[in-house]
Amino acid sequence: MRRYLLIFLFTLLAYGATAQQFTLSGRVTGNKGEPVSFTAVYIRNSTYGTTANEEGRYHLKLEAGNYNIVYRFVGYREKVVPVTIGNSNETLNVQLEAEIFSREDTGTYDRKADRGMAIMREVLANRARHMDEFKSYSCLVYIKGVQRLVKAPKSLMGSAVIKELDLDSAGRGILYQSESLSQFNLQRPDKFKEITIASKNTGGSPAFSYNKASDLQLNLYENVFTVEGLSSRGFVSPVADNAFDYYRYRLTGTTVSNNRTIHKIQLLPKSQYSPTFRGNLYIVDGDWRVYSADLMLTKKNDNINLIDTLNISQQYIPVRDSVWLPGSIQYNYKGSVFGFRFTGYYVGIYNNYKIDQKFPDGYFNGEVLKVDTAANSKPSQYWNNIRPIPLTAQETRDYHKKDSLFALQHSDPYQDSVQRANNSFNPLSYTIFGYEAKNRRTKESFYVAPLYRTIFYNTVEGVGIDAQVKYTKKFDDLRSYSITPVFHYGFSSKLVSPNVHAEYIYDPLKQGRFFTNFGADVLDLNDVGTRSLWFNTLSSLLYENNYVKYYRSHYGDFGYQRELANGVLWTASLGYSSRKQLYNTSYYHIFDAKSRQYTSNNPLAPAGTPADDRSFLFPEHQALTFRTSLTFTFSQRYVTRPDGRTFMPSLYPKVVLNYRKGINNVLGSDVNYDFVSLDISKDHMPVGLAGYSSFKITAGDFFNKKTLYFMDYNHFLGNQGTTFDPTYIGSFHFLPFYQFSSNDAFLEAHYQHNFAGAIFNRIPFMRKLKLEEIVGANYLTEKNNPNYSELYVGIQRLFFRVDYGVSFTGDKKYIQGFRIFYGIR
């Protein structure tokens, strides 16, 4: 509580929300009286300032005194106006003059002789110095975002749509508004922590979102800049250490502003479709640093998603004589979807920089964002006091209307009516998505699995029912528990298999939970998974491919999980089961495919064994098994919100140590083995401009294997059939589900690289398809099956993917062909 009070006081001081302060306000215009939108306005020799709104209007909260107010915007001459604040509010309208950059050349560009190239060589030579000007800082960041609909198809603009979106008769209006205020703390090279003090948004989801300070950390001195959500690959900074490989530079003019000589440098990408920016840099002569930047990406040249153009404008200010940091940054974008045209912007204002801040030991503990519990409930008066950018009249009306609508939608009568509507049963929705009923007052929910997952077919049980329901109860302190009873029955095998899964999450911030499972079930012999009941039903009935092999188990287990420290997760469980071999009892199929026949339920039976085979795989037995694992996520990062904690991808590989023990002669247990494995994996590793890579390496061994049965072997995530699931890096394309299962030492390795369009982007007729190129390899070696390998190439667009690959056993070709993924697992 004490820390939040200090943050609140810090906010009040930063924005001058006190009774002794007064408002300096006005309008910034150009030579012809036009508004100069988003002009940076700040106090000279300080890090306190603001930005004008779209209409050029600004305001600053100031104490009585004398100030030099700086007005800056790209393309206009910087203006400094002395102001005296007495005991009242002051109005100051400012007219900016267009910046006139004198030229020395004739207008004909010569890349060898142009001074722009020499200037940028100086900038790159001083790049490391500018990156190391500070070790740490803290500041306050205010971010505002607005998205507008500017044109809509008349055929779709009915009165109901116009009313719902609050549009005018021409189909124009504000779709989305957001504001946030954060304290941002950074320590080089890569540690940061953001505390969101206040947050507000209205409207639907925008085209893309930058409503956190960490989202707007554009450092031009870094080599590659990634625009999250708009492109899966990065763009080369015009100040990167290898920038001359991608850019040519042209000096288009020079000016003198407040005793500084500023050079305007035009960016000329060497290739039209290279991952580069267009626009201009403004460079301080002698100091050779970035003064401001005006950059642009386009859908045509840069193949960005969701929007057509993105303009990035950044203003740097001197925090100290030798330290310059962003004073403001702005993203402007335009786009269209199905005839709907929209525009929007995000603007960030940085205030109260504290350079080389000393942070307490352990302050950067992996928590990269903490949202205060009251951040989303600040009243309008709070925002009126701290908001540095004035609202336009349209934005004020939009807030007023949507705040009133929000209050209505969150009233008890309205919420109750919505709950009744959502809890109504819809047969079509139940068939595809299932049925869920919630009680918002008691925080209880009841979910029934969809019909298509309830009815199944396999050759062991015939047509069957797998009916699942789930009851969940949540508490105000984020604790929760759930109970999932399942009724499983096969009409041909006549096996009744009721079972229950229950879980209690007692410490969600530390992933602390207890879980238990008990009952009877028909289980897959491969415990890492093969095909779901749904996919096995389709492959069996349509193609007579009964890939999945089953056994019977009566079981009970109890487990525990919790983080021992940030990034160290421990899981342990103890289970007992009575296991029995099963055989095929049903041979139904839809089509008469004489070329195919069902196979035995014994996965190790030789090829050609009839489907009604009853060969021996394992005897009926009991097993008491202890499992434990330690997962190490180095430098684990996470976001803490009032509703829980979200874990972010780590910059380093994840390590998982597994141990499994078959305990003999306890409760009649017949098993006796010890198994250890080690996993090292990393998903989505950026590789410069060439996309990203993923890998997983697993090694393991049974150092005691006196007594174990087929389901105790180490199994692998193989694949049979045309469809596959590429969402997990540890899977194979062609490996049979059971034949390679091991009771000995093994090593498996997987590597995949997604070029993210880096190759196809160079081919004109392929660019518009926005396909991503994929290459990969999988490898497995174990005692009975040494040196199995797969090589594949693929293309991907959104959730659709097609791969072609070939596999080898030793030096002999094994299987080759296409594999398809279309979003359903």
Image (tube, rainbow, N blue to C red):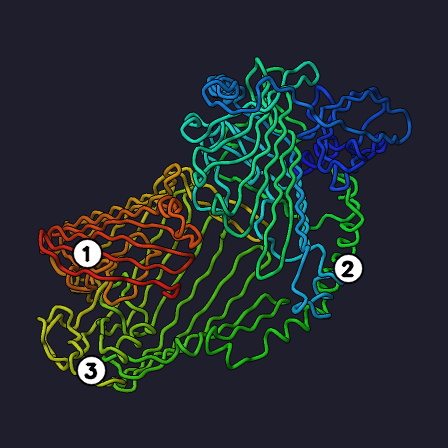
Residue at label 2?
404
Mark 1 sits on what residue? 806
Report which residue position mark 3 lands on: 593
Report, in whole angstroms, how far the alpha carbon at label 2 lies from the one at label 1.
61 Å
| Marks 3 and 2, how far apart at CA | 64 Å
Q: Position of residue 731 (x, y in %)?
A: 27, 56
Q: Nearer the viewer, mark 2 or mark 1?
A: 1
Position in image of residue 687 (x %, y %): 36, 38
Looking at the image, the residue that sits furthest to the right is 87
Q: Residue at x 75, y 44 (%)?
A: 383
Q: Residues within 10 Å of mark 2 (few under 14, many from 20)?
A: few
* Mark 3 or mark 2, earlier in chain: 2
Do the numbered discs 3 and 2 sit on residues whose CB atoms are within 8 Å? no
Helix, strand or loop at mark 3 = loop
Label 3: how many Cα within 10 Å (few below 14, some 14–19, many 20+): few
Q: Kindly indicate whether the residue at mark 3 contacts the one at mark 1 (C-beta within 8 angstroms).
A: no
Percent position of residue 591, x then y: 25, 84
Q: Amino acid at mark 2?
A: Ser
Question: Which of the two residues, 259 or 653, is positioned nearer the viewer here?
Answer: 259
SS class, disc 2: helix
Q: Nearer the viewer, residue 340 or 667?
A: 340
Task: State if disc 1 and disc 2 touch (CB < 8 Å).
Answer: no
Whole-percent x, y for residue 722 in the image: 26, 66
Quadrant hosting residue 814: bottom left
Is 722 located above or below residue 93 in the figure? below
Residue 435 left/right relative to 580: right
Q: Secondary structure at mark 1?
A: strand
